[in-house]
Image: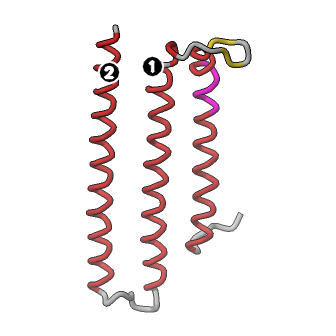
Amino acid sequence: MQNFKAAVAQILDTILHGYMKIVLQLGRANRRRQQARVHSVGGHLPGGHGAQLDHGLRWGRANQRLTAALLVSWLVVTFVGVYFARELSFRVFGWPFSFWLAAQGSLVVYLLIVWWYARRMRQLDRDCGIAEDD
């Protein structure tokens, strides 16, 4: 059983490492394309829209970083936390941690992820000047 858990942990680590490597490579390639677009028009777009392009690039990068971070937290809570919950033998609110994590904890974390994403994106939209009026 211990070998199986070690193998699963190694597989999850490999998958996560590979996924993050792909995300970083795509982000770098996307930044290079965007920078090439900015330089091809001399750093500014006709009609004074150069600042809007800079805000769009900043918004896109921040959005990618936030999405990647929240996706990793979702992955940890969904797979890693539940998989190793039985080995963490303590009680939370009178229930075994494995039961609490599967029944309540994961759902609470999912709601927090959605709340944090909405809050951060609203703030980022305001900072970049693309916020919609409420």
Percent of width and height locating residue 83: 45, 19
Q: First in sequence, mark 2 or 1: give its number.
A: 2
Residue drawn 50% across and 21% down? Answer: 82
134 sits left or right of 84 in the view: right
Question: Magenta residues, as a range?
Answer: 103-108
Secondary element at tag 1 = helix
Magenta stretch: dominant secondary structure: helix
Alpha-carbon neighbours of circle 2 within 10 Å: few (<14), some, or many (≥20)?
A: some
Distance, label 2 to label 1, CA atoms, is 10 Å
Quadrant of residue 17 in the image? top left
Percent of width and height locating residue 16: 33, 37
Residue drawn 43% across and 78% down? Answer: 53
Q: Amino acid at mark 2?
A: Val
Quadrant of residue 2 in the image? top left
Alpha-carbon neighbours of circle 1 within 10 Å: few (<14), some, or many (≥20)?
A: some
Q: Amino acid at mark 1?
A: Tyr
Which residue position holds label 2? Answer: 8
